[in-house]
Image (cartoon, grey):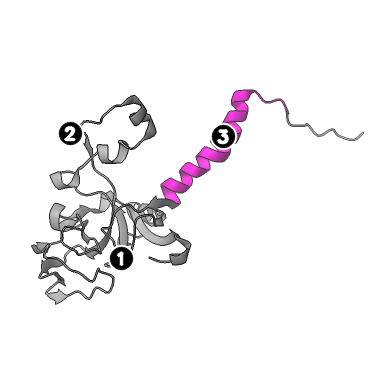
Amino acid sequence: MQEEIPQANPKLKWWQKFLKEVVLETLLPAWFVVTFLAIPVGVRGQSMSPTLETGDYLVVYKLERWFAAWGIRPNYIHRGDIIVVKPPSDNPNSLEPLSQYLEGLPLLNLLAWRIPDDWTFRPYLIKRVIGLPGDEIEVKDGEVWVNAQRLREFYVSEARGSDDAMKTVVKPNTYYVMGDNRRLGASLDSRAFGLVKKEDVAGRATWRLFPFSRFGTP
């Protein structure tokens, strides 16, 4: 007698179907990817011009950040890398008004609700790594000096302002970051808010997805 193969129950309850198709097959894999592997990030502002412009979309590689946290590859960030990082929490220059991000939302306009000016937050920034732990950094006459040697920067804007900075020794587990746009006042970076912590780095921006005309390594 032929053995009957049990059939899966086609009539799953709604919550079982939701758990299977939405949570297990969609949300959980998406959470795993953006938490441990990579995440797309959009560029807003001109602080990294001409390398990056508003509307560019980048891939931020996150797996190596976890490797560093686990002690597998602790020194994965190098000078010249473009990273996504939060500025230091103890510096007032790190805070931005929440209103400039949310007041354009249709729902807020419909409710005629204005966000208070004192509501601030610490945004993620896209910057280039200039100084590594142990480096001595100085910015004078628009030029960057690392350990008393002028840093050759092919990626910066042609116009350079006088946003100079005194000598700074980069502490362990921190980085000195700057924007590629060196016009006066164009980039809020370590010259204003100081060193950024390794733990506040979300990852390196390793690939540009859009626009397609500039697809590839930024």
Q: Quadrant of the C terminus?
A: bottom left
Q: Helix, strand, or loop for circle 1?
A: loop
Residue 203 % position (x, y): 35, 55
Q: Residues within 10 Å of mark 2 (few under 14, many from 20)?
A: few
Depth check: give the residue in front, 79 or 96: 96
User: Which residue in the protein does label 1 denote?
Assistant: 50
User: Which residue in the protein does label 2 denote?
Assistant: 118
Disc nearer the start of the sequence (3/1): 3
The reply to whether the magenta stretch includes residue 133 is no
Instruction: Name which residue type carries label 3.
Output: Val
Per the model, the C-alpha gap separating discs 3 and 2 is: 38 Å
What residue is at 25 percent from the left and 31 percent from the top? 115
Q: Residue furthest left?
A: 166
Using the image, tell me which numbered label, if any, was put on residue 22: 3
Q: Are marks 3 and 2 in contact (CB under 8 Å)?
A: no
Q: Helix, strand, or loop for circle 2?
A: loop
| Residue segment shown in magenta | 9-37
Depth check: give the residue in front, 187 or 59: 187
Q: Residues within 10 Å of mark 1 (few under 14, many from 20)?
A: some
What residue is at 36 percent from the left and 35 percent from the top? 105
Q: Is residue 58 left or right of residue 95?
A: right
Per the model, the C-alpha gap separating discs 3 and 1 is: 41 Å
